[in-house]
Image (cartoon, coloured by chain):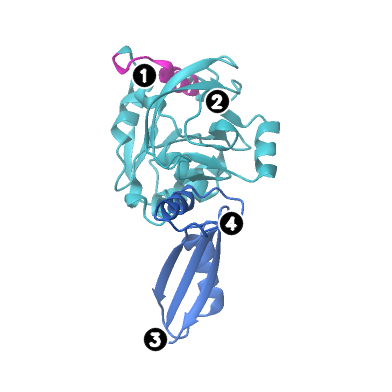
Amino acid sequence: MKTAVIVFPGSNCDRDMAVALEAVTGRAPAMVWHGDSELPDGTGLIALPGGFSYGDYLRCGAISARSPIVKAVIEAAERGVPVLGVCNGFQVLTETGLLPGALMRNAGLNFVCRDVALTVENSQTAFTNGYQKGETITFPVAHHDGSYFADDATLDALEGEGRVAFRYAEPVNGAARGIAGIVNKAGNVLGMMPHPERRIESAHGGDDGRRLFEGLVAAIA
Amino acid sequence: MKARIFVTLKPGVLDPQGRAIHHALGGLGFDGVNDVRAGKLIELDVADGTSDADLDAMCRKLLANTVIENYRIEKAAA
C-alpha cells in the first residue's frame, strides 16, 4: 500500500511516522512537502505528523491547514482516503474542519511529555480494530496545546455516534470529557494527541501503537 | 488603511493563560480583579479600498477560529 507523510516546516515526528508506516506496510511512505499541491497517485493512507508546524504561529495548525498540500488532503479525505493526524496533525485536522472542535492550551499550562494510559472507546473504527473496546493502552504524549474543546452539543454527538476513539484514563491536559482522539462521521479521519508511532517496538518501551497501524493497514487492504 | 482585529476567546471557553495572569495579579497585591481573559490583536495594513466583506472573510478563514474565538474589526485611517 502507498502511504504519504505530510511534512510541514517545523514537523518533528515525520520520520517517526515514516518508520512506523514502513514497519507495517513494508514500503517507505512518500514524504510530501507542504508546498506541493498534489499527493502521489494511488496514495491509500495519509499521515499528518506531530511537531510545531509554522512555529505554532497564530494558532497550532492554523497556517498548515491553509497550505497547498492540505487542500489535496481535504479532497482525498472527502473521497474516503484514510487520514491519520497525530498531535500537531490532530490540530491541523480540527483547523481544516475535517474534525470538529479545537485543541486548546493545556489546562495546567505546562507542556506535558510522558507516557499516559488511554482507554479504547470504540474498537470498530478502521484505526482501532486492533484493540478491544475498553482496553487500556499506553502511548506517550508530548504537547502544550492538547486540551480538546467542543461545545456540549458536539461532544454529545461525538459520544452518541461512537466517534470518541480514545479517552485519557488519567488526568492529562484538561480535555473535555477526557477525549484523546476522535474520528470523523465517515470514519476515515482520525485525530489524536498521543503518539502511536512512538510505541511500535519493545525498544520504545512497548508496542501498543503498532496495533493501530497494523489494524489500519488490514482495514484498508 | 489600518485595520485592527481583536480576537478573543468565546465566553465559556476555558482560558488557562487568563487564569494564570489573574493569579499573578493577585500575587502582586491587586485584589480587585474579578476575571482575566487573554486575547490577541492583529494589525493589518491593507489597501484603502479593502471592503468590510473582505476583512470579515480574512477573519473567518484564518485570523480567528470561530469554534473557540470571537473577533471584532476596527478600521482606522493610516
Name the residue carrying label 2.
A126
Point out the stretch of residues depicted in magenta: A203-217
Rendered cyan, the chain in question is: A
Please say if A144 is above or below A200.
below
Q: Earlier in the sequence, mark 2 or mark 1?
A: 2
Secondary-structure class at tag 4: loop
Left or right of residue A177, residue A14 in this image: left
Name the residue carrying label 1.
A200
**What is the CA distance from the residue labelled 3 to the residue labelled 2?**
55 Å
Q: Chain of mark 2?
A: A
- Give how far across and how far down residue A60 sits, in percent: 42, 49
> Was residue A208 drawn as part of the magenta stretch in this picture?
yes
Please say if B13 is above or below A215.
below
Q: Residues within 10 Å of mark 4 (few under 14, many from 20)?
A: some
Secondary-structure class at tag 2: loop
Mark 3 or mark 2, whichever is nearer to me: 3
Q: Chain of mark 1?
A: A
Task: For chain B, give the colour.
Answer: blue
- Give how far across and how far down residue B70 sits, in percent: 57, 62
